């Protein structure tokens, strides 16, 4: 490939300089600039230093072929950019390469003071790397510049379309990924796949291509990626090179206007943005030493996610699962997805046995409840009893389980922050986390602070307490920071048995569990519906429809339940016709309870109600009947019980 000598005339006038290397580093000249070479975890790496760095040290990260088409790099060096490269050649953007890239990024940003956001430069197969890393780290990328990039490895090196491919490279790729041919063809995370996070961050991309490229045809690579990215709202530019000789079946071509492309990178990299650090919102405490030992030594681990709709919906949960699989490829993971919309700490503490612990030994447990504890108006003491109950119950099942408490964002909490108050839900999560020395993440405060710092907006970026793809990335990046930090600490310290802690509050729900509806003694007006579904067409929640249920609709319908424990309640369905009930324990006075919620008119909602939570730990009798009265908003007097709750 011919270069453009005009761009090097100035740079090559400098033929010698005083070069200073740190321990483990070597320096040399590279087109008149100082090149620093070193090894990071035994992987060769380097960066080129500008003569006068711009404020904030903006940089370009070359994915591959670091000495090919260096015109633009040289211009950017002259303007004050660093140019960096780590040799992950022949790893084809695989998870192994991405872990090396994570370490390289952390080294340059934390140890060398490089800018938190980097411009990625991918040439040919380098496209596999820049898009792979950008999709995993969109908050850390300022823009992407790509030359004839591979955007689907089925095209190259696979040769499964217009490209003839490369059989040797294809086999190498299969080996690196551990794929069979069938698995590779079914792979759905090529650069052109799952671009939602990048698009949400509005990462600008620029592809320079040849319309005559038969090796990496644009019809199979650039054009489908660009079309998908644009439809997701991502900013794109494509420039077809047409001047000069095009070789290697059109894949090699002269780069016209390298100063234009340098302008593109500079425009999106300068001035350097310094977003808030995730570390301010993460408290590692005792860390995750036991989970780390199980993952790295036993190489078989179970990770559970217990939460509401933010855990139920795909997003951060799946990203955390994938991160763990990529970071520890030799470990077999089992993931328990125990998110149920609308449920907070109280329901979690009674369903953890059935929905999580019954599935086997759990090594790492993520818990979130702060959003629904606010919207469900769970009182502070009940929150503490429930959260502590979850931790203690999990540790009874596995004394070595590591638990992470997470506090997600919602606008109500922002109102507390503006008034200088700590939301009760966050305070309770942190109180339990501190007592048991659990890692915790204050994501609510992080989102609030980042919005206040004008990094993004709630309305247009985060959008909802059920986060947009942008918000899911915000959550995941901080979780990834916690995990990386905790694992790094665990790798250098011996594991210690978890201490047996005294209870934080009296009456925690550490023995909370479901009691079958078949245990109740039914009197007049109740029936057992084997496979309940609504007759009114109103929507439901998974797990609370097409299942057995106790149902009564006539006032006066009564039942009783004998139980032993300190707390009792019901898990019910609260729909448009939910009425009121009256209940008493051990023949005390009857008390009334409204089963309607603010959402009942639109949804048959799973709802959890406690009748008592601080009883003597002995045998009791619950009596329950339908009241003749009802909420004015209700269309009936129904009660539908899915489980009884007993601690």
Image (tube, grey):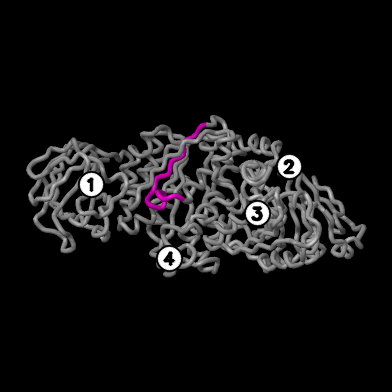
- Rendering quarter of residue 427: bottom left
Say what secondary structure mark 2 lies in: strand
Q: Which label's residue is closer to the chain start, 1 or 4?
A: 4
Q: Nearer the viewer, residue 467 or 143?
A: 143
Q: Which labelled disc corresponds to residue 533?
A: 1
Q: Which labelled disc corresponds to residue 218?
A: 3
Q: Which label's residue is closer to the chain start, 3 or 2?
A: 2
State which mark lies toward you, 2 or 1.
1
Q: Nearer the viewer, residue 464 or 204?
A: 204
Count neighbours of disc 4 (C-alpha within 10 A) and say few if under 14, some if 14 to 19, many if 20 or more. some
Query: Which range of residues does the magenta coloring cover?
Result: 300-314
Say what secondary structure mark 4 lies in: helix
Callouts 3 and 2 close, C-beta under 8 Å: no
Residue annotated with mark 2 = 43
Q: Which label's residue is closer to the chain start, 4 or 2?
A: 2
Which quarter of the figure is the C terminus placed in?
Answer: top left
Callouts 1 and 4 close, C-beta under 8 Å: no
Callouts 3 and 1 close, C-beta under 8 Å: no
Distance from Cα at disc 2 to Cα at disc 1: 59 Å
- Asked if one can make out residue 454 in the rendered structure from this viewpoint, the answer is yes
Q: Which label's residue is closer to the chain start, 2 or 1?
A: 2
Q: Which label's residue is closer to the chain start, 3 or 1?
A: 3
Q: Which labelled disc corresponds to residue 414?
A: 4
Distance from Cα at disc 4 to Cα at disc 2: 45 Å
Residue 124 locus on image (x, y percent): 71, 50
Say what secondary structure mark 3 lies in: helix
Callouts 2 and 1 close, C-beta under 8 Å: no
Q: Which of 442 and 467 is in front in this view?
A: 467
Count neighbours of disc 3 (C-alpha within 10 A) and say few if under 14, some if 14 to 19, many if 20 or more. many
Distance from Cα at disc 3 to Cα at disc 2: 32 Å
Q: Which label's residue is closer to the chain start, 3 or 4?
A: 3
């Amino acid at each position: 490939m011919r270069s453009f000598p005009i761009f090097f005339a100035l740079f090559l006038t400098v033929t010698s300089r005083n070069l200073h290397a740190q321990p483990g580093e070597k320096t040399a000249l590279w087109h008149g600039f100082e090149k620093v070479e070193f090894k990071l975890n035994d992987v060769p790496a380097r960066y080129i230093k500008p003569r006068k760095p711009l404020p904030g040290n903006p940089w370009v990260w070359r994915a591959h072929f670091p000495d090919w088409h260096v015109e633009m790099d040289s211009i950017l060096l002259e303007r004050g950019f660093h140019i960096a490269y780590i040799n992950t050649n022949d790893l084809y953007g695989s998870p192994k390469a991405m872990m090396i890239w994570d370490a390289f990024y952390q080294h340059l940003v934390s140890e060398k003071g490089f800018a938190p956001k980097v411009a990625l430069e991918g040439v040919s197969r380098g496209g596999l790397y820049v898009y792979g890393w950008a999709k995993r780290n969109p908050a850390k990328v300022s823009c992407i510049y790509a030359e004839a990039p591979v955007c689907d490895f089925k095209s190259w090196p696979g040769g499964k379309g217009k490209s003839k491919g490369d059989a040797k490279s294809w086999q190498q790729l299969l080996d690196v990924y551990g794929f069979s041919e069938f698995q590779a063809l079914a792979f759905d995370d090529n650069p052109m796949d799952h671009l939602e996070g990048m698009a949400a961050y509005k990462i600008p991309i620029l592809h320079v291509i040849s319309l005559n490229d038969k090796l990496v045809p644009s019809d199979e690579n650039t054009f489908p990626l660009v079309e998908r990215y644009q439809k997701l709202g991502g900013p794109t530019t494509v420039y077809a090179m047409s001047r000069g000789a095009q070789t290697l079946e059109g894949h090699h071509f002269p780069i016209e206007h390298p100063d234009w492309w340098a302008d593109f990178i500079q425009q999106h990299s300068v001035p350097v943005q310094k977003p808030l650090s995730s570390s301010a919102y993460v408290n590692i405490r005792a860390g995750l030493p036991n989970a780390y030992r199980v993952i790295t030594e036993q190489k078989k681990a179970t990770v559970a996610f217990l939460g509401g709709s933010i855990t139920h919906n795909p997003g951060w949960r799946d990203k955390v699962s994938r991160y763990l699989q990529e970071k520890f490829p030799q470990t077999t993971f089992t993931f328990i997805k125990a998110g149920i919309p609308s449920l907070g700490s109280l329901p979690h503490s009674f369903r953890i046995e059935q929905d999580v612990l019954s599935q086997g030994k759990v090594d790492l447990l993520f818990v979130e409840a702060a959003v629904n504890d606010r919207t469900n108006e769970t009182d502070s003491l009940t929150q503490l009893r429930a959260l502590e109950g979850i931790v203690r119950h999990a540790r009874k099942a596995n004394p070595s389980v590591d638990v992470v408490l997470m506090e997600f964002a919602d606008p109500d909490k922002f109102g507390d922050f503006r008034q200088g108050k700590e939301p009760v839900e966050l305070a309770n999560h942190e109180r339990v986390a501190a007592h048991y020395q659990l890692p915790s993440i204050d994501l609510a405060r992080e989102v609030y602070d980042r919005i206040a710092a004008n990094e993004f907006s709630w309305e247009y970026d985060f959008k909802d307490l059920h986060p947009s793809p942008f918000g899911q990335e915000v959550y995941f990046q901080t979780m990834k920071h916690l995990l990386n930090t905790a694992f790094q600490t665990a790798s250098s310290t011996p594991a210690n048995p978890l201490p047996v802690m005294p209870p934080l509050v009296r009456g925690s729900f550490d023995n909370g569990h479901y009691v079958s509806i078949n245990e109740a003694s039914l009197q007049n007006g109740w029936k057992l519906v084997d496979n309940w579904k609504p007759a009114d067409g109103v929507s439901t929640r998974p797990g609370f429809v097409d299942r057995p249920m106790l149902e009564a609709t006539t006032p006066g319908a009564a039942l009783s339940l004998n139980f032993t424990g300190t707390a009792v309640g019901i898990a019910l369905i609260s729909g448009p016709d939910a009425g009121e009930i009256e209940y008493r324990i051990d023949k005390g006075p009857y008390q009334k309870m409204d089963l309607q919620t603010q959402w009942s008119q639109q949804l048959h909602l799973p709802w959890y109600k406690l009748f008592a939570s601080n009883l003597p730990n002995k045998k009791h009798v619950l009596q329950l009947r339908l009241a003749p009265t009802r909420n004015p908003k209700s269309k009936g007097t129904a009660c539908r019980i899915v489980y009884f709750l007993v601690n």
